[in-house]
């Protein structure tokens, strides 16, 4: 529990203090933020933390950057119910500005789960391949990876995923 609180204690100020691109004309700028979270048994209860912090994140970004068109998505990994063929990864909510719908999707998942495999590279690859990122060349795109397992597990190479990100 203490680890999860520390993670959010670090994540929230980092999101609020981010040096987002600012346009002097105050044109709406797309901001896509994906939370990629380990939801395996070692992080039981973490899903509740994400549910509770979602609106704090949205409101914090909007308060600091009112011109932002903020879209948030959530990718979860490490749950047996997500299936081995996907690398135990699932899009819980694609990038959206419909935060109530995203919140609803988060509440559809059980808060506690048995042990699962967490394949970080598969989860990161999923954020690249399956999320509907803004095509605007001026868009800000961020992925926050939250978990406590090795980043070198599973069938996908971390180096290959990072090369694709670059």
Image (tube, rainbow, N blue to C red):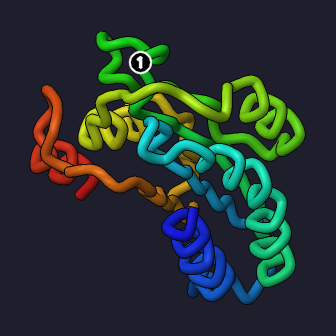
How many residues crowd mark 1 within 10 Å: few (<14), some (14–19), many (20+)? some
Residue at image point 65% right, 75% down:
12
Q: For this view, does 21 lie left or right of residue 57?
A: left
Image quarter of residue 85? top left
Q: Is residue 22 visible?
A: no
Residue at image point 67% right, 59% down:
30
The foreground one among 101 and 113 is: 113
Q: From what the image shows, is residue 38 above or below residue 63?
A: above
User: How many discs appear?
Assistant: 1
Q: From what the image shows, is residue 128 above or below residue 144?
A: above
Percent of width and height locating residue 162: 20, 52
Q: From what the image shows, is residue 63 above or below residue 69?
A: below
Residue at image point 55% right, 50% down:
34
Disc 1 on helix, strand or loop?
helix
The foreground one among 23 and 42 is: 42
**The N terminus - image quarter:** bottom right
The foreground one among 39 and 71 is: 39
Percent of width and height locating residue 43: 49, 47
The foreground one among 35 and 19 is: 35
Image quarter of residue 11? bottom right
Q: For this view, does 63 lie left or right of residue 106?
A: right
Residue at image point 23% right, 58% down:
166
Q: From what the image shows, is residue 146 above or below residue 89?
A: below
The residue beneath circle 1 is 80
Q: Is residue 23 visible?
A: yes
Q: For this view, does 39 lie left or right of residue 103?
A: left
Percent of width and height locating residue 153: 16, 38
């Amino acid at each position: 529990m203490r680890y999860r609180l520390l993670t959010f204690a670090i994540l929230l100020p980092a999101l609020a203090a981010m040096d987002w691109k600012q346009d002097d004309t105050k044109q709406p700028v797309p901001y896509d933020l994906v939370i990629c979270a380990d939801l395996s048994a070692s992080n039981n209860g973490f899903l509740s933390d994400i549910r509770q912090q979602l609106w704090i994140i949205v409101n914090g970004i909007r308060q600091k950057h009112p011109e932002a068109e903020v879209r948030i998505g959530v990718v979860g990994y490490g749950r047996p119910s997500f299936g081995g063929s996907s690398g135990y990864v699932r899009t819980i909510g694609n990038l959206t500005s419909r935060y109530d719908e995203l919140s609803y999707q988060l509440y559809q998942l059980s808060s506690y789960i048995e042990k699962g495999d967490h394949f970080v590279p598969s989860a990161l690859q999923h954020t690249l391949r399956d999320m509907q990122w803004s095509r605007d060349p001026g868009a800000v795109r961020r992925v926050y990876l939250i978990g406590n397992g090795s980043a070198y597990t599973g069938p996908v190479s971390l180096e290959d995923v990072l090369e694709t990100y670059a």
